[in-house]
Amino acid sequence: MKRKRSKIACVIDPFFLISWSKFRYGSKLTEVIERGYVTDDFYDLFSKETTLSFFRSLLESKILVIYDLFTESYNEVLSAVIRVFMDDERLCQLDRILAKLLAIAITEDIPLLSDNFCIHKFAKLYWNTSMVWSSYRVLRYMVDLGLFNNLDEILKVFSEDTGTIFVRLRRKDE
């Protein structure tokens, strides 16, 4: 059964966008994202014209919005996030841009789209794993909405286009 179309507000990791800019159906992100927050230092990370073009098209469509609501609450969360990453040996180093994005997602209580292992590990240890969406989860959501018919096929296409490797985990019933 297909779900009713439902767009999400979220924060988006720049490296997530780079992968999706390579995906032949990357423009379908606009069908699931109502508002995607980024920081103003995003542009510095993109060098390929296809990625810049993809990024510009999302900005022009008003799907991507540069976040600028840096409140005291955000600053406190950002400081706490940086401190946790510095103090917890189980976590890998996180650059400032990803720390800022994580702080925005936590402050606004919206998902962060990221394939970054460190972000997912942070969510598992300190936050909420359902608040970090990987490309796999976004593709699964798109299938649930009826944007694609077959999850296995679209995962294969995504992998071919982006070089992303999805690990197949055995289910208990297999």
Image (cartoon, rainbow, N blue to C red):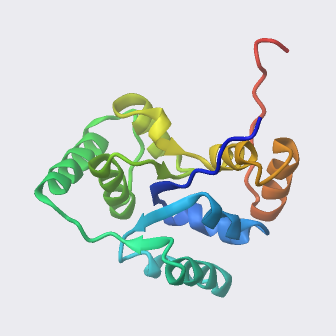
Q: Residue 85 is drawn in which quadrant?
A: top left
Give the x, y percent position of residue 127: 36, 34
Q: Is residue 150 above or below residue 34?
A: above
Q: Name the quarter where the C terminus is drawn.
A: top right
Q: Between 171 and 32, which is closer to the camera in this rendering? A: 32
> Left or right: where does residue 172 sit relative to residue 78?
right
Q: Residue furthest top?
A: 173
Above or below: residue 59 compared with residue 123: below
Q: Residue at x 49, y 35 (%)?
A: 130
What is the quadrant of residue 30 in the picture?
A: bottom right
- Residue 136 image point, x, y percent: 68, 45
Q: Is residue 69 left or right of residue 131?
A: left
Residue at 70% in and 47% down: 145
Q: Residue at x 45, y 41 (%)?
A: 131
Q: How many numbered tags mark residues here?
A: 0
Residue 73 shown left or right of residue 68 in the figure: left
Residue 75 coordinates in the image, percent (x, y): 16, 56
Residue 10: name its quadrant.
bottom left
Compared across the picture, whether 55 is left or right of 93 comes to right
Question: Which residue extends farthest left?
Answer: 72
Residue 137's place in the image compared with 61, above or below, is above
Q: Quadrant of the N terminus?
A: top right
Residue at the outermost front position: 4
- Across and down, in percent, residue 171 comes to 77, 19
For the residue pair 59 and 161, the one nearer the viewer reads as 59
